[in-house]
């Protein structure tokens, strides 16, 4: 039995929402449609011609990628060009492609947290604040017999998630009163006759980013023609999100020892090390930003980092880092490939929770273009 692609992505985006992506980042569906049934999903870091060949060979019908396959506009679709031919092959074999990029970097329990976990770094905060989300409260009145269904629907839409708890709510039973007009089509009662009904007042909190889907869930389940509800903006501290992470090693160590650890953890043949004129003998505070994070080195300095780990450091930026006394480890962009087994693990958990009949597989194609000789 297959699974709806829309259902899979609905669960995926509950964990890794699109709104967390940096402005202009082309996340989401790139090729194909979500209005289809899927049986085999492949997770990959990059969508390259050889990855597409692998997907075709393995009869994959949906790809989830870290890096957007269409990052810049495509001018022509020509089969003689391998880069554009892969788009044609994806369409020809009915393979949809979805991308999660900077939102995967920013989410809690996401890529940068996994890096820190692998390097035994105790996270103390993020490198650069990117988003601030306020909380709202929905108060809705529903007949008592419909209250359980309403609480379930609101929780399924994401309302009532607080810390390590979900589907949280508050309920109070009272009496609702109304008189339908002649133009009304009431679920309960008749025209021009006063009615009173035992109703449940349900209160749920939700982040403002979920308002559209929370209200849609409420209207979908509510039996009344004109539901009574209130939306309140709360003074609770907003939830903040950020790019990269800052943390502490359990004990100070030399940069040589730590650089060797980075090589071993990410199974690297080599890495680039940038050191200032007077490097620190021992290091403990680490800042990290997966991908190409050279532009954020001033944030690492503000955070008091002894070492900043990021990829694709530009030559002249490296000079600026040296001048400002920052030690930098550039392990390359490809260390982000750790997202593949991590997301397979996540999706297997969702599969078990939802009793999905679907197969998740990792791409086995090495897309790292660099080699050390």
Image (cartoon, rainbow, N blue to C red):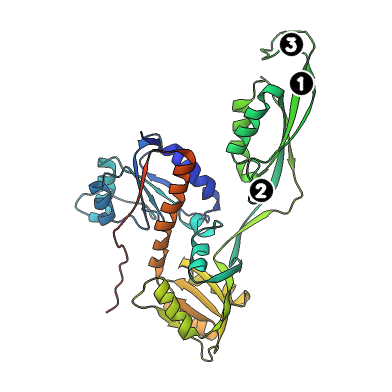
Residue at mark 1 = 198
Q: Secondary structure at mark 3?
A: loop
Image coordinates for residue 307, horizontal then vertical, percent: 53, 79
Mark 2–mark 3 CB contact (< 8 Å): no
Residue at mark 3 = 181
Image coordinates for residue 10, horizontal then vertical, percent: 49, 41
For label 2, the crowd category at 10 Å Cα-Cα, with few meaning under 14, some 14 to 19 and many 20 or more, is few
Residue 66, above or below 309: above
Quadrant of the image containing the N terminus: top left
Residue at mark 2 = 162
User: In the orientation shown, which residue stands out farthest toward the left?
Assistant: 80
Q: Secondary structure at mark 1?
A: strand
For label 1, the crowd category at 10 Å Cα-Cα, with few meaning under 14, some 14 to 19 and many 20 or more, is some
Q: Identify which residue is drawn at 41% across, 52% down.
A: 344
Question: Mark 1 vs mark 2: which is more N-terminal?
Answer: 2
Question: Closer to us: mark 1 or mark 3?
Answer: 1
- Number of numbered discs on residues: 3
Question: Mark 1 vs mark 3: which is more N-terminal?
Answer: 3
For label 3, the crowd category at 10 Å Cα-Cα, with few meaning under 14, some 14 to 19 and many 20 or more, is few
């Amino acid at each position: 039995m297959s699974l709806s692609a829309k259902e899979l992505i609905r669960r995926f985006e509950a964990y890794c929402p699109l709104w967390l992506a940096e402005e202009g980042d082309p996340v989401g569906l790139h090729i194909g449609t979500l209005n289809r049934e899927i049986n085999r999903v492949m997770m990959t870091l990059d969508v390259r011609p050889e990855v597409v060949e692998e997907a075709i060979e393995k009869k994959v019908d949906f790809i989830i990628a870290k890096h957007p396959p269409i990052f810049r506009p495509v001018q022509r679709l020509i089969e003689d060009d391998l880069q554009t031919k892969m788009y044609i092959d994806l369409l020809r074999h009915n393979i949809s492609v979805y991308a999660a990029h900077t939102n995967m970097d920013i989410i809690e329990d996401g890529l940068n947290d996994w890096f820190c976990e692998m390097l035994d770094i105790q996270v103390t905060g993020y490198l650069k604040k990117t988003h601030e989300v306020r909380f709202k409260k929905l108060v809705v009145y529903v007949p008592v017999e419909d209250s359980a269904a309403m609480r379930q629907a609101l929780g399924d839409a994401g309302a009532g998630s607080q810390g390590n708890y979900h589907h949280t709510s508050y309920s109070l039973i009272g009496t609702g009163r109304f008189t339908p007009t002649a133009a009304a089509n009431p679920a309960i009662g008749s025209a021009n006759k006063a009615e009173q009904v035992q109703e449940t007042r349900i209160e749920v909190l939700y982040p403002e980013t979920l308002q559209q889907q929370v209200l849609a869930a409420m209207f979908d389940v509510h039996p009344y023609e004109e539901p009574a509800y209130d939306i309140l903006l709360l003074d609770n501290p907003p939830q903040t999100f950020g790019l990269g992470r800052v943390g502490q090693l359990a004990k100070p160590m030399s940069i040589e020892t730590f650089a060797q650890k980075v090589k071993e953890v990410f199974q690297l043949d080599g890495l680039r090390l940038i050191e200032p004129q007077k490097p620190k003998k021992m290091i403990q505070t680490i800042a990290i930003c997966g991908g190409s994070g050279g532009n954020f080195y001033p944030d690492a300095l503000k955070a008091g980092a002894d070492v900043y780990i990021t990829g694709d450091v530009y030559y002249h930026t490296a000079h600026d880092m040296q001048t400002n006394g920052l030690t930098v480890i550039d392990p390359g962009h490809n260390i982000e490939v750790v997202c593949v087994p991590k997301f397979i693990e996540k999706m297997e958990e969702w599969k078990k929770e939802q009793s999905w009949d679907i197969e998740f597989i990792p791409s086995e194609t090495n897309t790292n273009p660099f080699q050390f000789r």
